[in-house]
Image (cartoon, helix red, strand yellow):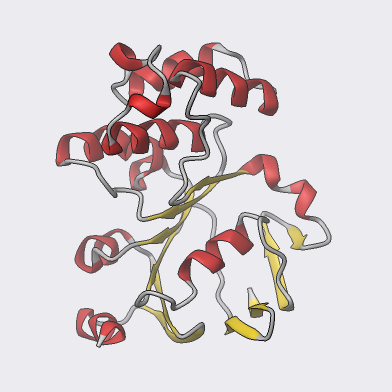
Amino acid sequence: MDGLGRRFGERPALTGVSFDLGEGETLAVFGPNGAGKTTLLRVLATLLRPHRGSARILGARLPTEAWRVRGSVGYLGHDALLYRDLTVRENLRLYARLYGVASERAGELIDAVGLARRADDPVRDLSRGMLQRAAAARAVLHDPPLILLDEPHAGLDPAAADLLEPLIGRASRRTRVVVSHDVEHAIREADCVLGLRAGRQALFGKPALDEVRALYE
């Protein structure tokens, strides 16, 4: 990323954001509410077009070559992106068809996230933590090399978070961009840190814990 910018109308949401992330590395993104963290993830996920600067993801330039990377990026955001009236199994099989993935993959992931007993329940009946687990399964269904995670442990107890570690954690060996308010945990997992404040880059690299916490003051 070099000088990445995005605005909504006349209001800038991101201004001059620049960073490089190597294959298999984890970038932790910090900042207070409204800092531009979710906007950054949505640009990287090709859901929003950048208005300024240049961005290259998995060798493809955004936004002109966004079509090349959409099948190689997994996105776990605040919205689970699951159909509430369909069951967990129906949702994952639907996404499997969209991605051209064997339907057996859906069953494997249902087991991996501990939802085998609720697989045939409508998504609307799941608890917050179960919904997050189902959304994580959806995000990695196509085995993407890059995953974008917006508060991935929201609503999860420690046991559920451990279930997701092989899929979306550092153990997955995927390239990851992780937005988190759990500063200490995210710093421990990160190869580098990006700090945002009011849409602008305030930190990048390996800052001290106190420097990251200062973003929220």
Q: Residue at x 72, y 57 (%)?
A: 59
- Left/right placement of residue 35 relative to residue 71 reads left
Of all residues, the one furthest to the right in this rendering is 64
156 or 3: which is nearer to us?
156
Residue 171 percent across, percent down from the top left: 34, 42
Where is residue 146? Give x, y as percent. Answer: 55, 48
For the point 46% across and 69% down, the residue is 37
Image quadrant in which you'd find residue 160: top left
- 171 vs 143: above or below: below
Whether residue 88 sits left or right of residue 75 in the image: it is left
Residue 212 coordinates in the image, percent (x, y): 28, 80
Judge whether residue 21 can be spotted in this image: no
Q: Residue at x 63, y 73 (%)?
A: 1
Number of callouts = 0
Residue that protrudes farthest toward the left in the picture: 158
Q: In screen coordinates, is 130 left or right of 64?
A: left
Q: Is residue 47 above or below residue 116?
A: below
The spot of residue 208 in percent (x, y) is 24, 82
Q: What is the quadrant of the C terminus in the image?
A: bottom left
Q: Can residue 40 be seen by looking at this rendering?
A: yes
Quadrant position of residue 127? top left
Nearer-the-camera pick, 11 or 54: 11
